[in-house]
Image: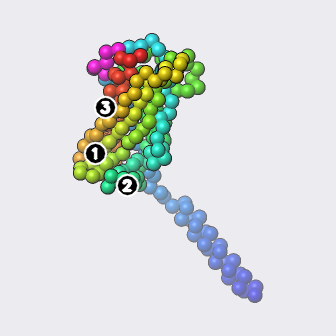
């Protein structure tokens, strides 16, 4: 009986040690990808002294992640395995929306909830699409719905959906990210221009 116990004990130790050694082996880290905010706003006509709040955009669960999405067959969503966004996508989009308004030089103040601003307007957004679409040619697709809300009375001032699709020239992760970055750039330029002529 003691021989069997010793044999089992030795086998368990070997398994545990094997697992530890395997865990210490080198792993290939996923690449971290960021998005840029636009810096040039040639067609901006308005400016505002209002203070603007940018909450975190809403998004369906499939997009509320740091994974980079790929959509095929119209409805199937998968993710690239070799890279991820630098933050959850809605948080990353919120940061770039704020930067876009700041880069325009046309707003008095803009920020996130909890930063102590005396808010006049909120820009409520929903990320409807943010993925590489591979049906009929690969393209980075970004679609964001926005509402301008008067924070004093809750009235919706205006609503609009912004969409851009940029051909990527390939379906690997690097061209996909470049296409999505360019599509977001286009959407944010339009968003900033639209907001500034309405408040």
How busy is the neighbourhood of tag 1: few (under 14 within 10 Å), some, or many (20 plus)? many
- In the rendering, at what x and y percent does residue 189 appear? 33, 27
Look at the numbered discs 1 and 2 and tell me whether their residues touch, using CB distance below 8 Å. Answer: no
Q: Was residue 43 drawn as part of the magenta stretch in this picture? A: yes
Q: Which residue is mark 2?
A: 76
* Screen quadrant of the N terminus: bottom right
Q: Is residue 18 above or below residue 55?
A: below
- In the rendering, at what x and y percent does residue 173 appear? 34, 49
Q: Is residue 158 visible?
A: yes
Which residue: 36% across, 38% down? Answer: 143
Q: Which residue is mark 3?
A: 186
* Screen quadrant of the C terminus: top left
Q: Earlier in the sequence, mark 3 or mark 1?
A: 1
Q: Magenta segment, which residues?
A: 41-46
Q: Which is in the foreground here, disc 2 or disc 3?
A: 2
Q: Earlier in the sequence, mark 1 or mark 2?
A: 2
In this orientation, which residue lies closer to the viewer: 199 or 70?
199
Q: Which residue is mark 1?
A: 139
- In the rendering, at what x and y percent does residue 159 appear? 40, 27
Examine the residues drawn in magenta and state their main secondary structure: loop
């Amino acid at each position: 009986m003691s021989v069997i116990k010793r044999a089992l004990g030795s086998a368990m130790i070997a398994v545990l040690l094997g697992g530890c050694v395997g865990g210490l082996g080198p792993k290939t880290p996923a690449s971290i990808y960021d998005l840029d905010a636009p810096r040039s706003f040639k067609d901006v006509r308005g400016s505002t002294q209002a203070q603007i709040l940018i909450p975190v955009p809403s998004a369906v669960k499939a997009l509320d992640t740091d994974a980079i999405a790929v959509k095929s067959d119209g409805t199937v969503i998968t993710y690239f395995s070799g890279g991820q966004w630098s933050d959850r996508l809605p948080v990353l989009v919120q940061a770039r929306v704020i930067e876009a308004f700041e880069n325009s030089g046309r707003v008095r103040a803009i920020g996130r909830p909890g930063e102590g601003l005396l808010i006049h307007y909120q820009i409520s957004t929903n990320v409807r699409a943010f993925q590489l679409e591979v049906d009929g040619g690969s393209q980075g697709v970004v679609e964001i719905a926005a509402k301008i809300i008067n924070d004093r009375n809750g009235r919706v001032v205006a609503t609009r959906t912004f969409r851009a699709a940029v051909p990527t020239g390939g379906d690997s992760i690097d061209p996909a990210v470049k296409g999505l970055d360019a599509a977001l750039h286009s959407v944010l330029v339009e968003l900033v221009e639209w907001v500034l002529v309405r408040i």
